[in-house]
Amino acid sequence: STIVICVRCYYHQHLSGSYIVELCDGGKDEYSNLQALCPNCHALKTRANILRRDKAFKKEFGKRFDLMQTNSFKEFEYKPKQSKYFS
């Protein structure tokens, strides 16, 4: 069986899907734009997304949201290995 974990904190129960790039920001409604988040991480991401749109919070929460968006799958990216037999 497959175990799904939160991409931010590695919690593994009661996960929900979240867009990596929000639809309102030009993200696509497709599988490659989804990530599994636990309720706490989903709340943090949603709060940062809402607050980054407010002028008073834009600078700080804009940075946080951008980091959440760009680092979502860094750990899981495919990194091809060099073969000693094939080039």
Image (spheres, rainbow, N blue to C red):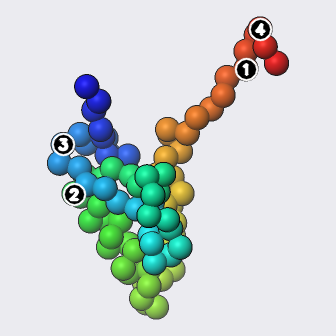
Q: In this view, does 66 lie above or below 16?
A: below
For marks 4 and 1, give the one nearer the viewer. 4
Most foreground residue, 56 or 11:
11
Q: Nearer the viewer, residue 48 or 80?
A: 80
Name the residue type under label 2. Pro
What label sits on residue 82 in the rendered view? 1
Question: In the figure, residue 42 lies in which quadrant?
Answer: bottom left
**SS category of the residue bearing label 4:** loop
- Mark 2 and mark 3 lie on one chain; the one further toward the N terminus is 3
- How many other residues sit within 10 Å of disc 4, few (<14), some (14-19) or many (≥20)? few
Left or right of 86: which side holds 32? left
Q: Quadrant of the N terminus?
A: top left
Disc 3 element:
loop
Contact between marks 3 and 1 (CB within 8 A): the answer is: no
Tell me if label 2 and label 4 are in contact, CB under 8 Å.
no
Q: How far apart are marks 1 and 2 (CA)?
A: 39 Å
Q: Earlier in the sequence, mark 1 or mark 2?
A: 2
Amino acid carrying label 3: it is Gln
Residue 34 in view (yes/no): yes
Most extreme residue toward the front is: 30
Question: Are the residues tagged 4 and 1 within 8 Å (C-beta)?
Answer: no
Residue on which the image places disc 4: 85
Tell me the CA gap for discs 2 and 3.
9 Å
**Residue 69 position in % (x across, y down):** 49, 60
Q: Find numbered disc 1 in the image and state the secondary structure of the residue it sits on.
A: loop
Find the distance from the CA under tag 2 to the CA under tag 4: 46 Å
* Element on which disc 2 rests: helix
- Which residue bears the numbered disc 3? 13
Residue for badge 2: 39
Upstream in sequence: badge 3 or badge 1: 3
Location of the C terminus (image quadrant) = top right
CB atoms of marks 2 and 3 within 8 Å: no
